[in-house]
Image (tube, rainbow, N blue to C red):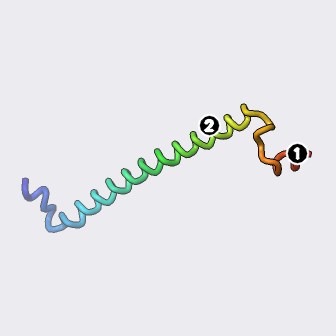
C-alpha cells in the first residue's frame, strides 16, 4: 500500500497536482455560486424597478426617454 502512495518517487508531484486540481474545482464552484447570486440580485433589482414604475427612476433616465 505504501508503494501506491509513494508512486515510484513521484508522489509529491502527483499528490500536489491532485490537490491543485481539487482546489481549482472548489474555487470555481464558489465563484459560480457568487456569480449566480449576483445575477439573481441584479435581476431582482431590475424587476423591482420595473414594477415600481417610472416615478422611481432617476431624473436622467426620464430625460433620455424624451
Q: Residues within 10 Å of mark 1 (few under 14, many from 20)?
A: few
Q: Quadrant of residue 5?
A: bottom left
Tag 1 near tag 2, CB within 8 Å: no
Q: Secondary structure at mark 1?
A: loop
Along the line of sight, the residue nearer the viewer: 39 or 59:
59
- Residue sitting at 15 percent across and 61 percent down? 7
* Above or below 31: residue 57: above
Residue visible at 85% across and 45% down in the picture: 62
Residue placed under numbered mark 2 in the picture: 44
Residue 57 versus residue 22 in the image, above or below: above
The one of 22 and 42 positioned closer to us in this rendering: 42
The answer to whether residue 18 is left or right of residue 1 is right
Q: Residue at x 52, y 43 (%)?
A: 36
First in sequence: mark 1 vs mark 2: 2
Taking 24 as reference, is 12 above or below it?
below
Q: Which mark is residue 3?
A: none
Residue at 9% from the left image edge and 58% from the top image edge: 3
Work out whether residue 58 or residue 41 is closer to the camera in this orientation and state it.
58
Q: Which residue is mark 1?
A: 65
Image quarter (top left, top right, bottom left or bottom right) of the C terminus:
top right
Determine the secondary structure under disc 2: helix
The residue carrying pointer 2 sits among few (fewer than 14), some (14 to 19) or many (20 or more) residues within 10 Å by Cα, namely few
Side of 14 where 49 appears, left or right: right
Left or right: 8, with 62 as reference point: left
Total count of labels = 2
Residue 20 image point, x, y percent: 32, 60
Q: Position of residue 32 (x, y in %)?
A: 47, 47
The CA span between labels 1 and 2 is 23 Å
Amino acid at each position: 500500500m505504501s508503494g501506491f502512495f509513494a508512486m515510484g518517487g513521484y508522489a509529491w508531484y502527483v499528490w500536489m497536482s491532485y490537490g491543485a486540481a481539487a482546489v481549482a474545482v472548489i474555487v470555481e464552484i464558489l465563484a459560480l455560486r457568487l456569480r449566480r447570486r449576483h445575477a439573481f440580485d441584479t435581476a431582482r433589482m431590475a424587476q423591482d424597478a420595473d414594477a415600481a414604475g417610472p416615478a422611481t427612476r432617476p431624473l436622467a433616465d426620464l430625460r433620455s426617454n424624451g
